[in-house]
């Protein structure tokens, strides 16, 4: 009888142990499309792949209906055509971040450059071969609009906003924040190359993120890497001019980073700027900001921002090759 009791007890313990194993949090991977580009989530927790995918699609819908300049029915598109002056919480938050970057960069980061990016063909529209830059600059600049409560006040009805330089980072933050609300503490969220990570990867170490080598023709992200960043509880974004450009009729390379003061493509030896900080929306905006500022001013500002928890990795053209500038604490 004693042996039967012991056997039953052992069986119960084994069943409980197996049940515990079955509910042990595991890593799941979810991939798909968001904001017209790819997204990838790797997360540890109780969530199923379908649940994470559903959350991503909900956030994608919110972002597109609010911030997408490619959706003619989005709120920002209706603001750009002066069909409304109402701002939602997403636009308000992004404008606040953009205003901060505008001040930090002495006006070189500006979300009102849409007429210029349209003219140069960087907004999915046909480019103008010889745009009248001076006429477009009349309604470009942060001083051409203000925010009053939840409304935008345009000083010129032709002013248009373009949040593409921070919308992906903001969307990454929305999805990462949602994962945390649902109990995930170990995850990585990536949308179109902008990333936020928390905790550890499946190997139990900090997430490892590669920074691409910036040479013309490198159209395969991740294939050629310049360095690897160890990312723990941080966000990362990279901006570069070596993929998005076109050659005009005179053989000049026109890059997608526009100088909002001159109205022309930025001329700089800075090939790419990678930023690591707490929120992806700020990392995304800062990466573009540094590219717009040019090498020396970008390095000077990066050294000042180091004390505020902002880390950078710059790749700079030099002769036939390039050099780097880094304030990163963890890289290989």
Image: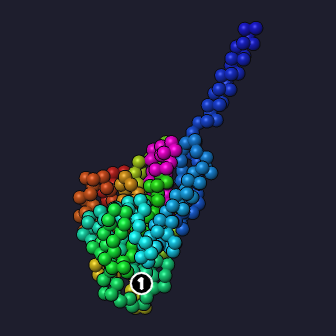
Specify the quadrant of the image occupied by residue 6: top right
In the picture shown, does residue 189 fall above or below 250? above
Residue at x 24%, y 69% (from the top left corner): 106
In the rendered image, residue 270, in percent from the top left (x then y), is placed at: 33, 71
Magenta extent: 177-199
Q: Residues within 10 Å of mark 1 (few under 14, many from 20)?
A: some
Q: Would you say residue 189 sits in the magenta stretch?
A: yes
Q: Which image quarter: residue 138?
A: bottom left
Q: Nearer the viewer, residue 160 or 13?
A: 160
Foreground residue, 217 or 239?
A: 239
Q: Position of residue 158 (x, y in %)?
A: 37, 80
- Residue reaching furthest to the top: 1
User: Looking at the picture, how far across and down is residue 237, in whole percent?
Assistant: 41, 61
The residue wearing badge 1 is: 119
Please tell me whether mark 1 sits on a helix, a strand or a loop. helix
Q: Is residue 175 left or right of residue 296?
A: right
Q: How many marks?
A: 1
Q: Is residue 240 visible?
A: no
Query: In the rendered image, which quarter contains the C terminus?
Result: bottom left
Side of 140 relative to 40 (left or right) = left
């Amino acid at each position: 009888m004693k042996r039967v009791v012991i056997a039953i007890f052992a069986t119960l313990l084994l069943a409980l142990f197996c049940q515990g194993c079955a509910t042990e949090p595991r890593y799941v991977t979810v991939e798909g499309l968001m904001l017209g580009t790819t997204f990838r989530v790797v997360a540890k927790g109780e969530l199923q792949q379908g649940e994470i995918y559903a959350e991503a699609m909900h956030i994608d819908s919110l972002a597109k209906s609010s911030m997408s300049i490619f959706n003619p029915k989005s709120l920002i598109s209706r603001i750009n055509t002066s069909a409304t002056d109402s701002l939602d919480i997403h636009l308000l938050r992004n404008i606040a971040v953009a205003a901060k970057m505008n001040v930090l960069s002495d006006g070189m980061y500006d979300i009102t450059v849409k007429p210029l990016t349209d003219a140069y063909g960087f907004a999915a529209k046909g480019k103008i071969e010889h745009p009248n830059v001076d006429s477009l600059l009349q309604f470009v600049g942060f001083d051409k609009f203000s925010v009053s409560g939840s409304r935008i006040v345009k000083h010129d009805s032709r002013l248009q906003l373009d949040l593409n330089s921070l919308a992906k980072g903001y969307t990454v933050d929305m999805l990462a924040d949602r994962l945390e609300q649902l109990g995930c503490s170990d995850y990585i969220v990536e949308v179109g190359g902008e990333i936020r990570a928390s905790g550890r990867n499946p190997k139990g170490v900090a997430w490892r993120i590669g920074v691409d080598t910036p040479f013309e023709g490198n159209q395969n992200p991740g294939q050629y890497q310049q360095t690897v960043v160890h990312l723990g509880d941080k966000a990362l974004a990279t901006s570069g001019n070596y993929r998005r450009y076109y050659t005009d009729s005179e053989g000049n390379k026109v890059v997608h980073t526009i100088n909002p003061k001159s109205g022309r493509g930025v001329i700089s030896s800075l090939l790419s700027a990678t930023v690591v900080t707490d929120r992806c929306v700020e990392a995304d905006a800062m990466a573009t900001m540094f590219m717009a500022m040019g090498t020396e001013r970008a390095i000077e500002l990066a050294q000042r921002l180091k004390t505020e928890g902002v880390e950078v990795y710059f790749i700079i053209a030099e002769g036939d090759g390039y050099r780097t500038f880094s304030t990163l604490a963890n890289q290989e």
